[in-house]
Amino acid sequence: MDRVFLKVGRERSVERRHPWIFSGAVERVEGAPDVGDTVAVCDSKGRLLGYGSLSPASQIRVRMLSFGADATVPDAEYVKRLVAESIARRVGHGGVSPLCEPERGVRLVHGESDGLPGVVADSYGGWCVVQLASAGAERWKAEIASALMDAGAKGVYNRSDVDSRRREGLPDAADGTVGILAGGEPPELIEIREGAIRYLVDVRRGHKTGFYLDQREARAQVGAFAAGREVLNCFSYTGGFGLACAAGGAKCVENLDLSQAALDLARQNFDLLFRGGVAPCPVSFVSADVFKQLRLYRDQGRSFDMIVLDPPKFAETKAQLMRAARGYKDINLLAMKLLRPGGVLATFSCSGAMTPEFFETICREAAWDAKRDFQIIAHTQQAVDHPVSLNFPEGAYLKGLILRGAVAPEQAI
Ligand code: SAH
């Protein structure tokens, strides 16, 4: 097997079981490994540190699959076992496989934190959707699909149309990275359930693998504060937080998103909710840019009792962080100004480069500028099926604050 030798002193992070080896840590590569090949990773003296997948074009040159001087050499069986173990960690009460629960939407494999760098696998009622974002993930595609089928998947659909693949030197969407990998053809829309709420998921055209499973618990937390409130659900996608608020007894819900396709599905999801027994409330769907629409509402003197801000990732990298910070401050400031006294703001950031502390600072500064006092009533984080390996803090990407405004809006400051 080809070997990668690290520079003197650069073995520390691998010894601490961090899965990424950056190009700057590599002294030399012995042999001529190809994209995605498994390599033995050695310190400067040639001592084995483990095995990983090579990404020759990426800044993250190797992603580790096994660690230590006596590490297992990753082969098809090993990769399949990692997938099976990851699924086993999601088995619910009663020992039922998550793939066999007809309406369960669940992340089965969450990349590095589940020991499978670059691999995401979600299941919607047993229909699996994978996103393979690294060279190693692509290399083990067939084994990953086969392990999912062995675990009871009805089919495995590939949605590896992610921009980051270009940094890995991998083919992008045009080159057959989307389509059936194994098993049957998924339905046009798959119905999943979160508590009392049913969602239709479009695995072909939806974002990511079709749905934002990572906000499952935050949606429930936010819904619990919605009773009697006029809600503005910004970046609504297919209804998410708006549905949770309607189920929680909101007075009315306005959903705002750029994507008409997302709003069309949101409309169907609200129909399902109200047909399922939740008392209907007035719901509207507005296709607009949140940055512009919040300014319009400010100029019109509109106000709300509850605003949700769940924007897409503003910062992909640390370099983009300051620009992203301005974006977060802008929407949070505008939203705070639109809130009535005692109003609730649920605000999120899914940018991995943004720490929870920095996000809170941005919200604090927005509140100063808005001349409003707020209390933090909850911190939120990604759902339990999106775990974070203690050795891989980069895995914690989603954070949120639920803030309650003071009753007298301009007191104290
Ligand atoms: N809250 C949702 C997920 C939101 S994802 C849930 O729980 O399911 C982010 C959404 O923001 C996407 O639907 C995207 O279409 C939308 N979006 C991105 N930029 C936007 C903008 N400037 N204005 C309005 N919507 C935007």
Image (tube, grey):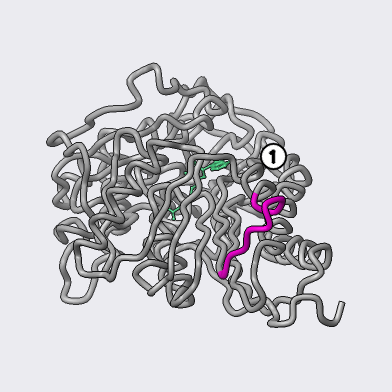
Say which of 257 and 36 sits in front: 257
Q: Where is residue 99 in the image (x, y as percent from the top left)?
A: 19, 56
Magenta-drawn stretch contains 296: no
User: What's the residue at 59%, 30% (across, down)?
Assistant: 58
Q: Does the residue labelled 1 lie within 8 Å of ligand 1?
A: no
* Circle 1 Cα neighbour tier, 10 Å, few/some/many (<14 / 14–19 / ≥20): some
Taking the view exactly as shown, the residue that stands out farthest to the right is 413
Q: Quick check: 363 left or right of 383? A: right
Is residue 17 in view from this perspective?
A: no
The residue where tag 1 is placed is 25
**What segment is highlighted magenta in the picture?**
297-305
On the image, which quarter does residue 244 sit in? bottom left
Say which of 33 and 198 sits in front: 198
Up the image or down, 340 lies above or below 9; here it is below
Up the image or down, 360 lies above or below 21; here it is below
Q: Quick check: 44 left or right of 58? A: right
Q: Where is residue 234 in the image (x, y as percent from the top left)?
A: 54, 53
User: What's the residue at 60%, 62% (across, down)?
Assistant: 347
Up the image or down, 75 lies above or below 176; here it is below
